[in-house]
Image (tube, rainbow, N blue to C red):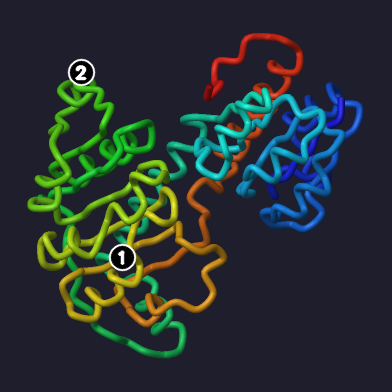
Amino acid sequence: MKVLVTPTSLRPDKPSPALQKLQAFADEIVYNPYGRPLTQDELIELLPGCDGYIAGLDYVDASVIAACDKLRVISRYGAGVDRVDLAAAKEKGITVCNTPGANAQAVADLTLGLILAVARKIPVLDADVRVGGWRRSTGVELYGKTIGILGLGAIGKAVAKRAQGFSMKVLAYDPYMDETYAAAHDITSTTIDEIVREADVICLHLPYMPETRHIISEELMRKMKQGVIIINTSRGGLIDEDAAAALLESGHLGGLGLDAFEVEPVGETPLSAFDNVVLTPHTAAHTHEATANMANMAVQNLIDVLSGQECPYVIR
């Protein structure tokens, strides 16, 4: 068995129980030689001859799938599969699986961290003190505010629990809402329109797909409450970033906390000019605990499929 491993957290210089299990299973392992998500051309060069592929944040499009001569499984290191062409994989007979819930607590932690950082402008105040300043800034409290959560999966549920610890009212929208869970945990199941009208903070925990691209549009943002804070620790492309910059300039938006962007790495962005914007490098899932969980699940998924065993996390 030959396996390609591209997540930057899974490297031979970082030994782990998950890698040891994979090394005992596979005859040959090819690791990511670049230390970043791979391009399509790089994947096309590395995937031929591979039976399995543990995929990081690479874009696995139809051209990559077409180049796979032996591949039987793509095991995503993470929950999102929007960067994998599922239709092309299905046509080629390649099983795709993921690791749902493995990083939920880590992402929920960063979500709350970004809310607090934006609401109190923590990064700019820290930077000012470090250079001898003593700037005063008046922020906003979370106590008694309303948070709207778009996507009440494992991460959304974890965010709701944390927000309730700050005495926030929780509204949630999910096209596949777990109504029983929401009712039992004092979460109001509602529509996007109501969340837009009522929420002081809006958090995104949705997958990226054609239907959700720019779901946070200029039109929708203009309908939000003055001073609303928007947080995205999910996928880039959910927010119209240009429109958000214009609404920050006008003062309509109270702030943004973004861990995912339409183009990554971000490079230059007008969003960096605002002190009520906090930007992090798609790092929400990067805790010791979450990376261990994702690694263990991703490796086990791959082994299950290649061994002919039932895998509980197959996407299709």
The quadrant of the rendering that contains the N terminus is top right
Splitting the image into 4 quarters, where does residue 274 fall? bottom left
For disc 2, the marked residue is 180
Q: Nearer the viewer, residue 146 or 191?
A: 191
Question: How many other residues sit within 10 Å of disc 1, few (<14), some (14-19) or many (≥20)?
Answer: many
Left or right of residue 108, residue 202 in this image: left
CA gap, disc 1 and disc 2: 31 Å
Dot label at residue 256: 1
Q: Is residue 208 visible?
A: yes
Question: How many other residues sit within 10 Å of disc 2, few (<14), some (14-19) or many (≥20)?
Answer: few
Q: Nearer the viewer, residue 109 or 231?
A: 231
The percent coordinates of residue 120 (x first, y second) are 26, 68
- Residue beneath the point at 17% across and 40% down: 170
The percent coordinates of residue 87 (x first, y second) are 55, 32
Q: Of helix, strand and loop, which one carries label 1?
A: strand
Q: Is residue 289 visible?
A: no
Q: Of helix, strand and loop, which one carries label 2?
A: helix
The mark that comes first in sequence, 1 or 2, is 2
The percent coordinates of residue 83 (x first, y second) are 55, 45
- Residue beneath the point at 39% across and 61% down: 258
Identify whether 8 is placed above or below 249: above
Q: Amino acid at mark 1?
A: Leu
- Residue beneath the point at 24% across and 27% down: 177
